[in-house]
Image: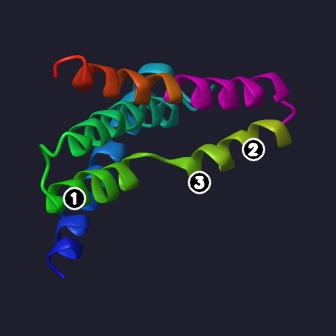
């Protein structure tokens, strides 16, 4: 039961972070490309790499892994938003932007998970 509370706490933090980052990216770049979604997916992927690596090294309690890995990062990252935004771009005839969105989110997020793990594992 305590893990559920930790997930809820992490989820509330992640949701607020996602909202604030998305607002900031809209102010900086406007609405021509879903940069907010890309940024939160990259950040979430990097943090997931760190959480995973620290968990493998037993430096995180199960409660903290639940709070950050499931709650915070689950609310911060935005696969459903990414999917919707990509489809909307394609429906609007912006095929190149749609494919670019898929390419950037998938490839760069994989790189960010790797870098997050590398950051931790290289220090052991």
**What is the quadrant of the N terminus in the image?**
bottom left
Residue 88: mark? 2
Which marked residue is nearer to the observer: mark 1 or mark 2? Answer: 1
Foreground disc of the pair 3, 2: 3
Residue at 50 percent across and 29 percent down: it is: 109
> Who is closer to the viewer here, 113 or 95?
113
Q: Residue at x 66, y 43 (%)?
A: 85
Q: Quadrant of the C terminus?
A: top left
Q: To which residue does mark 3 refer?
A: 80
Q: Residues within 10 Å of mark 1 (few under 14, many from 20)?
A: many
Where residue 30 sits in the image (x, y, percent)?
52, 26
Query: CA–CA distance between discs 3 and 2?
Result: 12 Å
In the image, the segment drawn in magenta is 92-109
Q: Residues within 10 Å of mark 2 (few under 14, many from 20)?
A: some
Measured along the vertical axis of the image, is residue 56 above or below residue 121? below
Residue 44, how many percent across, how many down? 38, 38
Q: Is residue 94 magenta?
A: yes
The mark that comes first in sequence, 1 or 2, is 1
Q: Nearer the viewer, residue 60 or 96?
A: 60
In the image, taking residue 104 as reference, residue 75 lies left or right, namely left
Q: Is residue 123 left or right of residue 100?
A: left
Q: Residue at x 67, y 50 (%)?
A: 84
Q: Nearer the viewer, residue 72 or 113?
A: 113
User: Which quadrant of the view contains residue 80?
Assistant: bottom right
- Mark linked to residue 48: none
What kind of element bears circle 1?
Answer: helix
| Membership of 9 in magenta stretch | no
The residue where tag 1 is placed is 67
Q: Under tag 3, what secondary structure?
A: helix
Which scheme is used to colour this image of the protein?
Answer: rainbow
Mark 1 to mark 3 CA distance (whole Å)? 21 Å
Circles 1 and 2 in contact, beta carbons < 8 Å:
no
């Amino acid at each position: 039961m305590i893990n559920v509370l930790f997930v809820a706490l992490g989820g509330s933090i992640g949701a607020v972070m996602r909202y604030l980052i998305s607002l900031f990216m809209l102010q900086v770049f406007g609405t021509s490309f879903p940069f907010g979604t890309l940024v939160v997916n990259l950040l979430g992927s990097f943090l997931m790499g760190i959480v995973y690596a620290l968990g493998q090294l037993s430096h995180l309690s199960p409660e903290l892994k639940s709070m950050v890995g499931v709650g915070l990062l689950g609310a911060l990252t935005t696969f459903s938003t990414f999917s919707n935004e990509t489809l909307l771009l394609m429906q609007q005839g912006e095929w190149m932007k749609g494919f670019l969105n898929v390419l950037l989110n998938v490839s760069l997020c994989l790189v960010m998970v790797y870098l997050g793990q590398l950051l931790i594992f290289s220090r052991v």
